[in-house]
Image: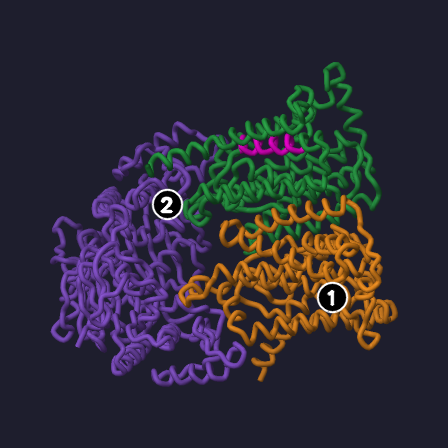
Amino acid sequence: MPQSFRSLLKELDVFVILGALLLVAAIFKASTFYNLSNLFTVLELSAVLGIATLGQAMVLIVRGVDVSVGAVMGLAGTLSAFLIPGFGIAGAILIPLVVCGLIGLGNGLLVEKGRVPPIVATIGMMWVVSGLAGGISNGRLIPIQDEAFQRIALGSAFEVIPLFFVGLVIIGALAYFVRSNFAIGRYVYAIGGDEGAAYYSAIPVAKIRIGVYGAAGVLYGVAGLLMASYVRSGMPTVGKGYEFKAITAAVLGGIALTGGRGNIFKAIVGAVILIVLYGVITAFAVSPYIQGIIQGAILVGAVYYATRND
Amino acid sequence: MQLAMTKATASLQRYNQLFLLVAVLAIATFVSHGVFIRPTNLILVIASAAAFGLVSFGQALVVIGGGFDLAVGSLVAMSISAIVFFRADYGIVGGTVGALAAATIAGLISGLFVSRTKIPPFIVTLGMLSVADSMSWILAAGQPITVPEYDDAISPLFDGFPLGQNIFPIIILIAGFVVTSLLLHRSKWGRYIYAIGDNEAAAKIAGVPVMRTKLLCYGLSGFLCALGAIIYLYQNISATPGEGADYLLLSFAATILGGVYMYGGEGTIPGVLVGVICLASITSALTIAGVPPSIYQGVLGIIVLAVVLFQARLRK
Amino acid sequence: MAHRLELENVSKTYGNTRALDSVSLAIPSGKIRGLVGENGAGKSTLSKIIAGDIRPTSGVMKLNGVETPYLTPASARRAGIAIVHQWGDLVPTMTVEENIFLGSEIHGAFGTLNKGEMRRRAREVLNELGVDVDASLAVSELSPAHKQIVAISKALVRQCDLLIVDEGGVSLDKKETVLLHAVLQQLRGQGVTIIYISHLLDDVVALSDEITVLRNGALVETLDARSTTAEDLAIAVVGHEVRRPSRIEETSDFTQRRTLLDVKGLSWTHDAAEFSLEVREGEILGVTGPEGAGKSELLRTIFGLMAPTRGMVLIDGKTIAARSPREMLKRGVAFVPEDRFAEGVLLDRSIEENISLPKLSFEKRFFLPTNELKAEAIKKAAQIKTKMASIDSLVSELSGGNQQKVVVSRWLEDSYRLLLLDEPYKGIDIGAKDDINDAIRAMASGGRGVVVISTEFAELIGLVSTLLVIVNRKIVSTLTGPSITPHEIVRYYQYEVEAPSPSFEASGSSAMN
């Protein structure tokens, strides 16, 4: 049955790419790439990008885009570091997440009620948020002394799998479960697929869209907190470039820029692919400066491939 | 009553740039306890606006034509590194020409992708942003940058004048203003740009050369970024590779403040000049008042969002 | 027994326009009411009021004999009313089952979706309608008929018993139309009341129990379908015997003239549908047919806006292979699109800018010759009697008819030898229609050629020398001279009479059929 094999291959495209990359690493750079320390880092960073990508994917599905990812991540970490002395670890985790959620809702309101193009709204919000983060940190890093917080990054299950990654799996599974088993999952895709049809079906389009941006904000906050743990400080610029990576990962994972289509699980795999790719590039001792060119090429290439039939 | 309201909003739209300028100048003077409004300071303000002002004119052309150029910041940074790179073998003249060419070509590549594929402009220029950023590090070989040649060559020419070193940037800013103004408001290309920004499908059916116009806009934007880089080096002499992200923020803010409509089809270059001066004034006032730079970004972001929302209101 | 729906003197005005003028009607339960009328007659306004999408300006609505306040989408749904817009209510990327239950999902434990039950019910509903569709397919993969049936199923699942089918049957072939009719009759048997809106008059006559005719926002009459023919309907829709003025040049006069446009075997799809036609100097060729028949696509493919799959287009005897709007304009061919908002006018630019745009597109000089452009624009606007405050006013300030005139006036000069117009009369007042027709006639008498598409064939009858009737992407009839009458036209306004051969030729100057 060649036809269904081809469509199966098409469905599993992300895994094929991932597999190919891992194969290349195994053949050429086995020792550099396949050691416990490196794999641990890869899994950790995959988790951070994966969670951020999940948020971005949701926004893309409702026909939006979010370039405030990096800034929100930075704010989460900075705010958390700032709050630890006064509010303890619980407060330092909860409060930033709430703030990030509110920022996300702000984005949603700008887009939905303010009729501001998503790119402009999230760029504006990006600046406001980085100004905020800069203000809190006074332009410096805020070191995180709290042991418990630091241990999140170092912690692992079964000695091999980072806690970060466990977190990614849990969050990803939760997202998938909601998407498949609750009406809201369908509504989000409906809004992106054909907003008019969604209105006709009496779906509360505005509320859901705003909510999606808000939820995405929380996810960016989680990613930011993870990074803060990883670098052991609150750094406003810790998320620099993550919006770019998240969009690239989502598109790589099959999320359509025009909305309504794409599997969020594959989007997360897209994030893993990117991190593995960076790892492989580093293993080949390619200049890190080249990364930007490769990233740009991947993004444009992936979108070109996705839109060529529109 | 309806008619009176629409007439009021129409004149508000026409003159809101002027209102804005006056308001900003007033606030700046107040916040800085009068320091801002001194003539010497005003000249400094305009000179400081020169680099990002040029970039803003380019961004305005792209946005009015219905697109976005997210790469401008990186193109400025890439141009700075390109000057250093080409200077090594061809002297400062070669460095200048090389940078202008490189940035223009980068812009043309963006324009090509935007007009020939269905990839949205923000993705194309986001990709270019990444590539140009990489290039700015590669071309500078990761080393800090020092380019004293512009200052050495040009400053002596204006030695006799008070605040002489600010004259060159202001001249270039005015030149950029004149050229882009003529292009947008007096040439056929300007009409093409407005048409495409207003309704690209209709423009195409009416025979407008869409691809060539887009190439012009993005290419010119690249060129102006390189020009901005030259001004920057004239004023600052040294730079770190990759520096220039601010220009994206500033160019967007200036176009928005200048009355350019984010969906395309509306906006003027004089308006953008007003936006540029407003931004420079706000920076100046905030600096004089001792506000830290990190807050500055936040303030700008709020201003941008506020103006965009206000724009949307007026349109209803 | 009370009527399912009654409207008493329902009106809807938008500013100065009366979309509906004191319409009163009563629809009994379990019957199929056909609703016909030209574009702009008020059919969609009426159906939107019934479905709760818009509120009437005045009038009374009664459901089952009880007066009801004006409906909203939510209250209409609760009252069991649903409207099916072809398949515009479906999300193409989602499956049949997901679409059917969109917004009315069946829940299981803890608010989760009961997917098994939904799949079962979806299959059940589709079976009841006598249709075999795999509910797990994406809607985008279905045929148009099946898409419509899924849209109907979606309404049914919401306990709807008053169904409005808007433009049902268009874009369906014979087999699919039969299927759709069977489904609707099945529903009627189950007690569902149906309002069936369509341009396909034969369909409407075949399916309905009674037919309501709207014209210019007012209800003209309600006819018993059993004693009505499609021809009667056509006359009722148009309102008068449209006679052909004797001064129109007849087709036979054109055989000596040069051929401006020659289309051979043109197609934009991969099925058998192909088109061939000719337009000579001084000739006005009309193209009519129900919505979705492919008329627009034909013109757009000729003009280079759509990619052809095969066939040739010759202008002045020269083949033009790679067609694009710019290329066609250089050859003197211009196009007036159907949707002036989407593709016609630059709303926020001035009238002068709009009119001068094509000329400017080929301007060699860098700077704007402002005075020249202005003078030209004023001249062109005056030629078609555009009513405006000044040539510098924004196009958005003009009425619909004048906006359309701005678009048409761009091409009122000798260098444009062939003008293609797609539905130029849509949504404009009678005066504007006349002015546009005058301009078309002036063009033709100046030796240029014109092709006009319109579903308002009344306009075409008094204008064209040859009329093509296109149904389902085939030229089913070429009418010339005295046979251009509503009777003749409407004879073909139905699903395929018979499968035509792949290269059905229609030449404007050949002998009559």
The image quadrant of residue C493 is: bottom left
Looking at the image, is A273 positioned above or below residue C284? below
List the residue tagged with mark 2.
C332
Look at the image and tell me whether residue A28 can be seen: yes
Look at the image and tell me whether residue C289 can be seen: no
| Labels 1 and 2 touching (C-beta < 8 A) | no
Q: Magenta region's main secondary structure?
A: helix
Q: Which mark is residue B77?
A: none
Q: Amino acid at mark 2?
A: Gly
Q: Chain of mark 2?
A: C
**Which residue is found at the position 80% from the left and 25% from the top?**
B152
Q: Nearer the viewer, mark 1 or mark 2?
A: 1
Question: In the depicted view, which residue is nearer to us: A59 or A31?
Answer: A59
Inspect the magenta stretch and tell me whether residue B270 lies in it: yes
Q: Position of residue B261 (x, y in %)?
A: 51, 42
Q: How is the image coloured?
A: by chain
Palette colour of chain A: orange
Palette colour of chain B: green
Judged from the image, the secondary structure of the residue bearing numbered disc 2 is: loop
How crowded pointer 2 is (Cα within 10 Å; few <14, some 14-19, many 20+) is rated as some
Q: Amino acid at mark 1?
A: Ser
Report the span colored magenta: B269-283
Looking at the image, is B101 positioned above or below residue A70? above
List the residue tagged with mark 1.
A46
Question: In the depicted view, which residue is nearer to us: A286 or C283?
Answer: A286
Residue B89 falls left or right of residue C438: right
Palette colour of chain C: purple
Residue B193 falls left or right of residue B36: left
Q: Chain of mark 1?
A: A
The image quadrant of residue A90 is: bottom right
